[in-house]
Amino acid sequence: MIIKQFIIAECIVVYAVSAVFERKGTAVMKKFFIKLTTIDDVRNFVTAANMQCADIDVVSGRYVVDAKSILGLFSLDLSKPIEVHVYGTEKDAEEFYNAIKDVVVDK
């Protein structure tokens, strides 16, 4: 087994090349919709995204941007709800959801 460790924003990401890494349940993708109506909403969302180890994308139409990029978010049409994809563990997705639950909406 080959293991490389990288420290990124106080998160240790371990890449393992083995069959163990491909077990079901190690990584999930959670989707939900948000509505960012003010500049403070965008700032708080980006701050919450940057606190997470998981990869988080925001999808608006055919555009996909990194949720950790404030400029990327401002390039989207924020007048309607946008879709959020969280790629990580169940715990990562739940922590992020709880951090931004004030802007979560039903589509």
Image (tube, rainbow, N blue to C red):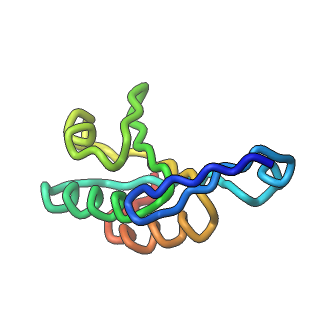
Q: Is 22 drawn above or below residue 7 in the view shown? A: above
Q: Is 6 drawn above or below residue 11 in the view shown? A: above
Which of 19/106 is in front?
Answer: 19
Q: Is 14 drawn above or below residue 59 in the view shown? A: below
Residue displayed at 66% across by 54% down: 28
Which of 99/68 is in front?
Answer: 68
Q: How many tags in the picture?
A: 0
Which residue appears farthest toward the top when viewing the image?
62
Residue displayed at 22% across by 55% down: 42
Which residue appears farthest toward the left when viewing the image?
39
**Which of the 4 quarters of the picture holds residue 14?**
bottom right
**Which of the 4 quarters of the picture holds residue 92?**
bottom right
Residue displayed at 68% across by 55% down: 27
Which of 17/100 is in front?
Answer: 17
Q: Residue 105, percent across and down?
A: 40, 60
Q: Residue 24, percent across and down?
A: 81, 55
Q: Is 87 drawn above or below residue 77 in the view shown? A: below
User: Residue 46 vs residue 57: left or right?
Assistant: left
Which of 9/94 is in front?
Answer: 9
User: Residue 106 vs residue 50: left or right?
Assistant: right
Q: Residue 87, percent across and down?
A: 56, 51
Residue displayed at 73% across by 58% down: 26
